[in-house]
Amino acid sequence: MPKKQLNKWMPTSGNMRQHRSLRVFSHWFENTQLWQLSRHTTAKAFAIGLYCAMLPVPGQMFIAVALAIVFTANVPLSFSLIFITNPLTMPAIYFASYKLGAWVLGTEPLDIEFEASWTWFIQYLDEIWLPLLLGSQVLGVALGILGYVFIDLFWRNAIRRQWRARRSERG
């Protein structure tokens, strides 16, 4: 069952409370539904985590945890999934988001040579922020919906297999 496999990698509420940057949310961590691994809390956590991972803003973890609390999703999964965007994957994800946003806006993407530096980002932010923000929102919503549907279907299928196995054992 997916629940057993996911429990292996899940941090505890105590671990999350000790995380320095998440202490603000510590009193909400007592709600057991936020730590529960069920089909609904896990699917919502995937939707939230994948959506927040695509956001081109600092503090993705705060947004993911806050949304998980508001929508009673699994907090550790929501928190963990934001790390899909890391220093290795950020350039590709944000470039794709920018291209998608430019396409949605119907504008031609700028032919700018990318440089992974803060000065480059500040210099071109005025020109790229709208397509980047729009593209990341579209990508985040799409991945969130796909993640929710995939986990929901995966979980339902696992339960069906268990029921079939029980029926075949009985006779």
Image: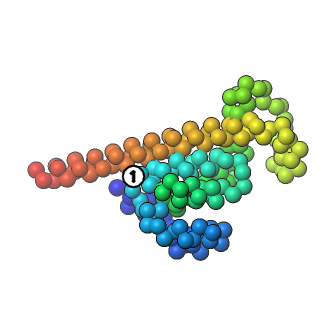
Instruction: Specify few, some or many for label 1: CA neighbours under 10 Å numbering under 14, 14-19, or 20 or more.
Output: some
Which quadrant is the N terminus positioned in?
A: bottom left
Asked whether 93 or 102 is in front, the reply is 102
Asked whether 3 or 105 is in front, the reply is 105
Residue 32 position (above or below residue 118) = below
Residue 111 on image: x %, y %: 83, 31
Residue 169 on image: x %, y %: 16, 53
* Lateral position of residue 165 relative to residue 151, left or right: left
Q: Residue furthest left?
A: 171
Q: Which three-letter amino acid code belongs to the residue tagged 1? A: Arg
* Residue at 73% in and 45% down: 91
Q: How is the rendered protein coloured?
A: rainbow
* Lateral position of residue 65 relative to residue 136, left or right: left
Residue that mark 1 sits on: 39
Residue 120 on image: x %, y %: 87, 46
Residue 113 on image: x %, y %: 84, 38
Question: Residue 92's image quarter?
Answer: top right
Question: Residue 107's image quarter?
Answer: top right
Asked whether 84 or 152 is in front, the reply is 152
Q: Which element type, helix, strand or loop, lies under badge 1?
A: helix
* Residue at 48% in and 56% down: 73
Residue 152 position (above or below residue 69) = above
Question: Residue 78's image quarter?
Answer: bottom right
Asked whether residue 96 appears in the rendered view, the answer is no
* Lateral position of residue 39 relative to residue 161, left or right: right
Asked whether residue 14 appears in the rendered view, the answer is yes
* Residue at 53% in and 56% down: 70
* Residue at 28% in and 47% down: 161
* Lateral position of residue 109 relative to residue 135, left or right: right
Q: What number of labels is visible?
A: 1
